[in-house]
Amino acid sequence: MGSILQMRGITKTFPGVVALDNVNLSVAEGEIHALVGENGAGKSTLMKVLSGVYPHGSYDGVIEFRGEECRFSGIADSEKRGIIIIHQELALVPLLSIAENIFLGNERASGGVIDWHDTFARTRELLAKVGLRESPQTRVTELGLGKQQLVEIAKALSKEVKLLILDEPTSSLNETDSEALLQLLLEFKAAGISSILISHKLNEISKVADTITVLRDGSAVSTLDADGGHVSEAAIIRDMVGRSLTDRFPPREPKIGETIFEVKNWTAHHPQHFERKVVDDVSFHVKAGEVVGIAGLMGAGRTELAMSVFGKSYGVGISGEVRMHGRPVDVSTVQRAIAAGICYATEDRKSYGLVLDDTIRRNIPLANLPGIANGIVIDEHRELDVARDYRERIRIKCSSTAQEVVNLSGGNQQKVVLAKWLFAGPEVLILDEPTRGIDVGAKYEIYAIIAELAKTGKAIVVISSEMPELLGVTDRIYVMNEGRFVGEMPTSDASQEKIMSLIIRSGHRN
Amino acid sequence: MSQEAIHQPSVTKPATGGAAGGSSSFIRKHMREYGILLALIVIMAFFQVVTDGILLKPINLTNLILQNSYVIIMALGMLLVIVSGHIDLSVGSVLGFVGALAAVMIVQWDMNYVLAGVICLAVGAVIGAMQGYWIAYWKIPSFIVTLAGMLVFKGLTLWLLAGQSVGPFPANFQLISSGFLPDVFGIKGFNLLSMLLGVAVVAVMLFFGLRSRFRNRASSHDDEPALFFFARNFILAAAIVYLTWALSTFRGFPNVLVVMALLIAVYSFITSRTTIGRRIYAVGGNEKATRLSGINTERLVFLTFANMGMLAALAGLVFAARLNTATPKAGLGFELDVIAAVFIGGASMAGGVGTIIGAVIGAFIMGVMNNGMSILGIGIDYQQVIKGLVLLVAVIFDVYNKNRA
């Protein structure tokens, strides 16, 4: 069999970051090619290059599709050639019908007037192909996620697909729906459609993939023959995580004291799909001076866990108990959680962490305005002193504390978020992806702040998708997958392979 | 106007002053704040010339204040609503409704006018609170809730008055709008009490301005360049002294001016110096981040609307007293003047941005244009077109400035 797709020497850089470094990828005619790697390894970037999201000229290298060199200037270009990508976040319009969604932008129409008869007939054909028994007029919002996924695939089929790219298609599906989807991929293969499957679930990959390419830090480190399910998962994991840890972390000597913070049997349900447990019977504790990590893949429920504990800011039907110093505390609102000494620094600082158009000086005291006020009257001199103090202590680089935070770099914005929570005086600080999207130098500074805080006896929880980071800064690690804690280990015993295999083995169980 | 109101620009935004950047960057950052003050001065100068000096005559100045008092009172509440990221379309109807209620209680039921006034303010607050409840706790868009409120209270006004005008009010009630500070010194043709009050206000304003400036210096707080500080204070002081003198030679300060000045002072202080004011700006700037900072955003929005309702009720009393009658048409379209004043004053539709003093100046810009064009005998048709264009230009200027920064 010849190859349908050749990507050679693909290099893509963003300011300050090499996202893809001379990557080669070759997909054979009619095969299922799996693409695996950690979060941030470059999988999505590579697929965006392929589908034209990053147009020709914005990257280096050559894409050859069905023997011709392609220079896509947008998604429409690549779709015309038959390369269709289905993203993790589905691109459906919830309030339109299945038929309307499938032919959106590609309507069966003459002179602008839609031929509904033809539209519904074609939709029924497509739905039969993907095995979805629903009326074409059903609104997408009434379908479960699995069925929505099938609608996306039907939409792809309506466009004469030659190469189907699925980005984590089963991450939000239950076992039966996942199984059906994988079966469908095998049927497509029999019909001669090639697919690229991006997934974290190695058991699924070994079930359906013909070839596996492992990406790590923006390079393709290996291409393995899946050999009908006989490939070793250990080998894949080693290739995924096998990077050496250099001294990217400040040294520290943990002084661990009494247990400060305990969460017991914590459960939270999805705010829209009430029956889904996003956090399922989780218990954990953190001691004074201890840095505890929560590892897991995206969508494991870590952010949801933290936010549901922090004033029930996420989820419904929350049950469980939070204790501080052994005594139960009320965390039913953010105010009460903060009063109990718990603070949470969000993973999404722009949407949830900062008032972007406001100044550094006015952002820092937001969670503790009484701290700069006499009664209800704000003392601007004290406000300025506080801002200057934190600017000095955690080195916020700015021309003045009167600078608006929107103009700061990611690392400095993150420091403003930290300053805000430090000024609120927490005993427990939950940091959600504290170094997301910031450069290496700033990361080191954030790690140093974490080490410093632990030294002063605070209990710290770090949620991170970057395993080297967890291994570098924490004392103990919990592993979370699909809403549950599936493992716990002292960091001294932990390795990326161990964590990854805990996640993958727990995936096997259900 | 009182010291706090005038003092306010330097207090609200000392934050963005760039001592390091020198005066050119200072101008760039504060273009909007100085721009609008300059615009008011230019517009006043223009009409002063083309009306042959009628605009600034004492009698016309008094008129100007009385005509615009209710718009300014409502603009104070509207500023808070808009800063918190919402809008209130119902204020015109609420104004009319409360005026009608006052008329029914005072004229038809012979109720004591003080008691009736207090009841009216409470009713306004309750109306605002009811609308705020749906907006804050049920997350129903404020545009829709207050659009409904606008229709409901317009209808209730008609019902309450049975389609008729009700009046006249007792003389004491009329004094809210048509009364002046008493001439306690008894000098013929000159209200010395008003003059002294005006001078006192200027003195207090200068005292606080200078004190704040020296304190800022002491803690090397960023501050506006000296030239701007002195020019701004000089212009304001001169304007107030002139205004005071002009009004004193006529009949003195109208009562409503004193009420207005106090309200402007209080609301300036709340927005710029208190924790609740700071929280309202934060809610408008980023509601989610504010809630995750432990601030009860729902209650804040609720209170903002309750406050708006109360101020609309106060404006309704002032308006009814001025007309000396409650008519079914009172308040028609006022919400648009109020909202326009706030936007001309530099508030942002998206929330989080705007100042009390800006809204007041915005209201005066609209008021001076109305007044000036009426003196010139320009038809209502052209007046509307010109006012509309001024609003558009003001907002385009904002957006242009923001994009350039």
Image (cartoon, coloured by chain):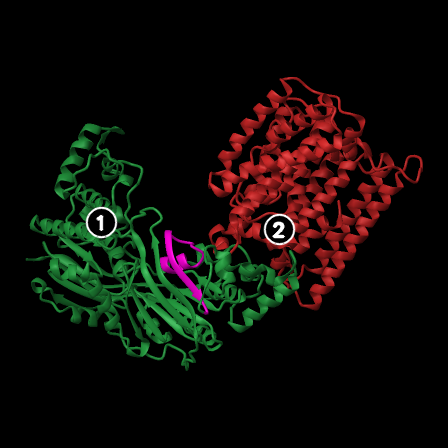
Chain colours: A green, B red
Q: Chain of mark 1?
A: A
Residue toward you, B388 or B114: B114
Q: Chain of mark 2?
A: B
Three-letter amino acid code at the position of disc 2: Met
Highlighted magenta segment, given as a residue range = A304-325
The numbered mark at residue B66 is none
Picture quadrant where residue B274 is located: bottom right
Identify the residue position indicated by label 1 in the image: A78
Instruction: Give the x, y percent position of residue A1.
Output: 5, 57
Label 1 – label 2 distance at C-alpha: 48 Å
Residue toward you, B330 or B64: B330
Question: Is A498 rendered above or below residue B77?
Answer: below
- Magenta run includes residue A456: no
Q: Is residue B318 visible?
A: no
Relative placement, left or right, of A481 versus B153 is: left
Relative placement, left or right, of A124 versus B12 is: left
Picture quadrant where residue B396 is located: top right
- Magenta run includes residue A306: yes
Element on which disc 1 rests = helix
Pick the quarter of the image with the N terminus of chain B: top right
Instruction: Give the x, y percent position of residue A428.
Output: 45, 68
Relative placement, left or right, of A506 versus B225 is: left
Residue toward you, B125 or A172: B125
Q: Residue furthest front?
A: A327
Three-letter amino acid code at the position of disc 1: Ser
The numbered mark at residue B31 is 2
